[in-house]
Image (cartoon, grey):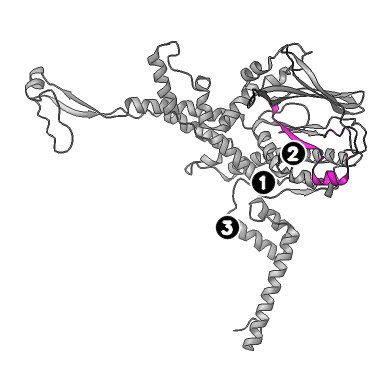
Amino acid sequence: MAEIVAKQNGVTAEGSNVDFIRPDLAEYFDQYDLIRVAIAGSIAVKQERTKYLPMPNAHDLSIENAERYNGYITRAVFYGVTGRTLSGLSGQVFNVDPTIKVPPILDAVIKDANGSGVPIVQLANEVENHVISYGRAGLFIDFPKTAGKTVTKAQQASGDIRPNIVNYLPWNIINWKTIKRGAKHYLSLVVLREFYDKPLGEFGYEKDIQYRVLALENNTYKQKLYRKNDTGSFAVTEDLIPVGGNGTPLDFIPFTFIGAINNDVKIDNPPLFDLADLNIAHYRNSADYEDSAYMLGQPTPVATGLTQDWVDNVLKGTIPLGARAVVPLPVGADFKIEQVQPNTLAFEAMEHKERQMVALGAKLIEQQKVQRTATEAGLEETSETSILASITNNVSAGFKFALECCSIFAGSTTVTEDANNETIVFELNTEFSLATASPDEIRSTIDAWQKEAITFEEMRAKLRRVGMATVDDNKAAQDIHKAAQQDLEFKKDTQDLLGNPIGTE
């Protein structure tokens, strides 16, 4: 990633250029790139060639060595542990629908959050994946250009004119600054790297880079767009002051970071890096193991004690092999099939890394023979769940901020800082468990509720954590009551038909 960004951006140490990349961000590029490739899977990893699978005898520049490396990398096996683990973790969050509450004027944003037809739940899923993977993402609330014209409620409700919520990967948020107002810090600058389709002839196009600069100048939010001019330098092509629903400029930048730990400007470590790094190391061990199996795995016939005369006159230059074949040998000679012992070193290295990946959350490759105490299993689950819950809460907070920014365009006066304000609610599910409860645990939970040892809500909370209860508690209570009434009516009808009291044979 560092090399890619450097080539595309013309990275410079001069802070006056719009394409300046913060050094603390650049330090993470190699980690981001490794994680990105590991998630993408085998084809992406192998396309990187020697970056993640060094060439044996790299000093040998011969054609033969290059051809041997092609076979070496082709036989190597990359197990998609990182990508499947990401899907499993994200699935724990979106297995239950999020809780969303917005004014009717924002229904269009819920159905199409970014203006490209992506619903807000799908966009939240994408952001959740990015934060789980890289520990960082960004949401930019892009206000429409109104040219000073009044926007009607009907235009907003239909979605014709409304803000869009845009997700940015961490390596595309290249620069930022903050200012202090009272006791709080606010963003005063955010520089976003974007790609656009530059026309190439009548039908073609090529991807080119542009930079969107969000700045706070004299407490007024301004936005500029930079593209390359004829001389190859970046110049301003758009310069505007977005306004809210009341026609006045904003006094803050409608952008928020979302992190693995919290949503401040500090870069959080990528949660999936250790797993992805082990996944790549496992791939290198696999390359050595598969190469040795290819080179030495076939059985080899060996004959000893033969003379040249015996080979020429008795065997006639060949040794018969297979069913019913007889190999005539002189006195003292021997014939056998040799096969090398398995290459246990590379295989053991692979198994060791698989156990490490299990400990880091790669549940999909956990071996049944690996035994853990109840305490160890509980600690692992608590650790993983706490990381996932922290990320999920941060994503929820980020999208709540984004929806509140959208409400400003719809006529609200400000973004609320009151955590108890329920005008806008966006909460992703955090009641998840990476392990399924046993039937005995489920029965004991229901039994405890029936004996009034726990409340209905406590029982439902336990069942939600293991993925069994998915509907709202109020609806569940209504459905249970309705089913009980139907059962009672059925028994009453049976009594009328048979003339027997309810509950008797």
Going by the numbered disc 2, the residue's amino acid type is: Gly
Q: Which residue is mark 1?
A: 94
Sequence-earlier tag: 3 or 1: 1
Under circle 3, the secondary element is: helix
Crowd around label 2: few <14 · some 14–19 · many ≥20 (10 Å): some
Query: Which of the two residues, 393 or 100, is positioned nearer the viewer here?
Result: 100
Going by the numbered disc 1, the residue's amino acid type is: Phe
Q: Is residue 180 left or right of residue 175?
A: right
Location of the N terminus (image quadrant): top right
Q: Which residue is mark 2?
A: 115
Location of the C terminus (image quadrant): bottom right
Circles 1 and 2, Cβ within 8 Å, touching? The answer is no
Q: Residue at x 82, y 40 (%)?
A: 162
Sequence-earlier tag: 1 or 2: 1
Q: Residue 245, located in which quarter of the rendered image?
A: top right
Q: Which residue is mark 3?
A: 439
| Residue 10, image x, y percentages | 68, 14
